[in-house]
Amino acid sequence: MTSFYLSKPYEPPQAPQNLPLNAPWALFGGISPDQFMKQYWHKKPLLVRGAIPAFALCSQNQEPLDSPISYEELVRFADKEEVESRLIRSSPWRFDHGPFEKKAIPALNKPNWTLLLQGMDAHHPAAKKILSWFRFIPDARLDDLMVSVAGIGGGVGPHFDSYDVFLIQMSGRRKWRISAQKDLSLNPNLPLKILQKFKYEQEWILEPGDMLYLPPHIAHDGIALDAGCQTWSVGFRSPSFKELLQEGLWRLAESLEDLPELDRKFADPKQNATNVAEQLPAELIEQLKQQLSRLKLDQIDRFLPGITAYLSEPKQQALFDSPAPPLSPKSFLSKLGTLGISAHPQTRILSLGKRVFCNGDEMTADQSSEITKAWVSLSANKYLQVKNLKKIDKSSLYEAYLAGWLIFEKVPARWI
């Protein structure tokens, strides 16, 4: 095991803006992102030794690397309300939700425990940079980066996930066992979602710098072999069609409030006398069909804005602080032209063509062409530096800054 007192923290680089999608990457064992997506994504597992070559190179030079976030830092994060944390113990299995005081978290030399911290990309720059490596996968699929730190024997038990995940070993060693078994039934007598019958088919020990990719529904069990073992999990959500359509329909129904012609009452001057009064009138059905056709409610394009808005919503734990004091529109423009503005780490931005949605709201509706262009650039690059914007004070860009959704920060150096 790496000696903590001899180690220096790994500093992950920011990925370049234009990722080389057809070039071989060490992160994927010498294949390109394009090859990875075609051969492995959502299809089969991939183990990559030395996915982060810096760990092996520094170890060879007797300068071992450790995780970018220390155990002590993780303990402090676990005490914050805005960080979703869980503490899992085995023998017997039990878990608690944070926040946790320092004394509630076991010492590194204690066995059979795991501390999980969700959404660390919103709280630590190193985690945010790691996510930039995976931006060849659509932003709409990204969930977050979870950090797991554990004592020897720590884990969450054999389980399966309903999403794609990259498991990056950042400190210590972890033994992984996986299976493509069809029986994914859970043990009903445990407080965690642990498989009732786990029969592993493959087994590996991951060293710092190694990575394991798992598609959905691959059973797996990870057990820490060293005190302070850290695994960073980059997860990609996969919402159900039920969830997407419900959210799309709900937002579509809300949008009907803006159509005054729908306030017109149903009228049936052509209704004939009927001896089946209990039946829904044919005239009502016909007029509803005409309305649906006129509004194009049977076409996917009417649903997509609502679905995009939903997928751009931030996590429930997200907190945004307004700038204090806020810049005036004039000062905002000046700083926008010199320093540039970025999305807050907890902000989500998605595009649907030239329409841009931020934290659940459409930001390009009723905006000038130059503000729309600015949002399109910000969505693509997560950073915007532009001069000479006009009428900024009433724009959605300035309002997003006032809400704390956009922040001024120096652009991180990028890896070449």
Image (cartoon, rainbow, N blue to C red):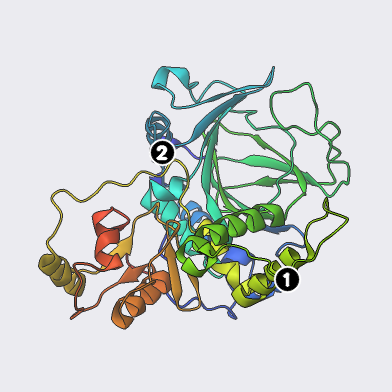
Query: In x, y percent, where is residue 60?
Result: 50, 55
Residue 380's disc is none
**Residue under the point 66% across and 70% down:** 292
Residue 9 visible here: no
Residue 410 or residue 382, whichever sits in front: 382
Q: Seen in the image, is 288 located left or right of residue 247?
A: right
Could you say which disc has been placed on residue 70 in the image?
Answer: 2
Which residue does the numbered mark 1 point to in the structure image? 270
Q: Position of residue 111 (x, y in %)?
A: 60, 22
Q: Is residue 270 visible?
A: yes
Side of 407 where 65 appears, left or right: right
Mark 2 vs 1, N-terminal side: 2
Query: Residue sitting at 64 percent across and 54 percent down?
Result: 246
- At label 1, which amino acid type do we have? Lys
Q: Residue, x 55% and y 70% (percent of image)? A: 136
> Residue 202, position in %: x, y?
81, 48
Q: Amino acid at mark 2?
A: Ser
At mark 2, the secondary structure is loop
